[in-house]
Image: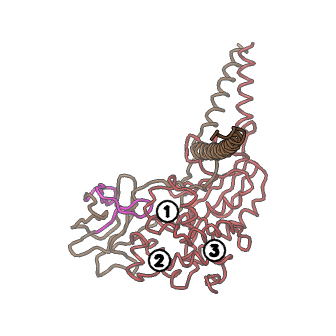
Chain colours: A brown, B red
Amino acid sequence: MTAISSVNRGILTVLLSLAVTFQAPLAVGADGGSVRIQDVRLGKGGLLTTRVVDLQGRPMSGQSVEVLHRGELVATAESGKNGLVTIVGLRPGQHEIVTSSGSLPCRFWAAETAPPSAISVPAVVNDASLVRGQFGGFNLPILVYAGATIGALVVGVHAMNSADDAQAANARLNGEVAALEQRVKELEPPASP
Amino acid sequence: MIPVVALLAATAWVNVCTGDGSASRWVVEEQRGHAVLYSEFSISAAAIWQELDEVTGLLEKSLGIAATEERVEIVLFASQASYLRYLSSGLPQARNRRALFYKNAGVSQIYAWNNRSLMTDLRHEMVHVRVHQHLPFAPLWLDEGLAECFEERLGSRADASRRELLRWKARVNQVSSLRVLERLPSAESMDGDDYRNSWAWTSFLLTESDESRRFLRDYVAEIHRGEAPGAFSSWVANQNAELLSRGNSYFRKMPSSLNFGSSLNVGGPGR
């Protein structure tokens, strides 16, 4: 019984340790800070113009966009050229513009009553999470590439040096052959008249 | 009996590898304001807060990029192996990066491991934290350019070789234009040249003249308001068609010490 308990405890410990080893990044807490609400100035006829962008601010076309009011869908559209979306017939009040991977809480205002901070074309970022890194660290492809390049350089330089040596040896032998030929000529008896 | 011993040995080995033999793996666990520091090794939390406060101050002073009340978690590992083990499944990008910034659901996280450049890495990642707290999105060249500019302490910027290489590249017209940097698809696709060129263009805009800095500040403010002004090169060309054409000349004569601090106007070429 004791042995079985020990085995179970051991297995459990191994599994827990493995779980810790391969865990995801720290869990995101609930206190992610207050959510900023964007003030948006509607155009005539309750016209909303918005732009869907990626995390670099580049326009994204062909993205589905929904407008929610108190969690209920009030309008849908698809972003066109330059990521632009236009929807008419919206009313002032708190809304949320939602894309497949992002959302923007908004407060819609009629043009006449909008505060100075309100904007006409809010951007909706269609991305939920973000990763940036400090360049450096272990990069196998770059190491392999660098190694191959250095290797090729060494082999190339060695080959060039060998070719130079061979050329020099060839030139030296040619010189020796020429000298021998000259010597042979000198030793040959002069042709009889 | 033998299987039990083997299992216990395996458990001990895994615990040694993960450093999880104790109740908590964190030797240092300290909260300050909205930031929390976790470290697997002993390190002065005060020194880290001081470095990160300086970065925060510089960003606010230079471009009006302000800290928010969003939570920031800084996680330090005793070794690269520990860092990779911790992040390999959740953030595979860690494999090719010395440190990482990760943001999700309004919480920013910095992951780094104990190495000679740790403070530089933390300053670099803290720039990303502040930029993405202040802005809903940021062009990659600006995001990384600011991180490169502010990653070293004032008065100790040992980036003479980077500056010298930039000068030579500018002389043979080999510095990528801003339009090329604006087309970079992702952070993963950036190489050393892209980081250096991002730093060069950001330094240019911050220090070339009051005008160049004002344009960058206005561009950042427009994004902060919630609008999408488009690519900076096109946006600024509508207001000053020749500003970016001054870049290469600036790079050729780039001053040996840039000052992004108390007087942002210090250090331009010919000054």
Distance Cα–Cα, label 2 vs label 3: 24 Å
User: Could you tell me which chain the residue with mark 3 belongs to?
Assistant: B
Q: For residue A68, say whether it is visible.
A: yes
Chain letter of mark 2 equals B
Residue A98 location (% of width, % of height): 35, 57
Compare residues A25 and A97 and report the one nearer the observer: A25
- Residue, x 67% and y 69% (percent of image)? B53
Q: In which quarter of the image is the C terminus of chain B?
A: bottom right
Which residue type carries mark 3? Leu
Element type at mark 2 = helix
Q: Which quadrant of the figure has residue B19?
A: top right
The amino acid marked with disc number 1 is: Leu
Task: Check the residue under mark 1 and report the chain it is in.
Answer: B
- The tag on residue B140 is 1
Callout 1: 10 Å neighbours few (<14), some, many (20+)? many
SS under mark 1: helix
Q: How crowded is mark 2: few (under 14 residues within 10 Å), some or many (20 or more)?
A: some
Marks 1/2 same chain = yes
Residue range highlighted in magenta? A49-75
Question: Going by the image, does A154 lie left or right of B211?
Answer: right
Q: Mark 2 points at which residue?
A: B244
**Residue sitting at x 63%, y 66%:** B165
Query: In the rendered image, which quarter is residue B163 located in?
Result: bottom right
Quick one: SS at disc 3?
helix
What amino acid does circle 2 point to?
Leu
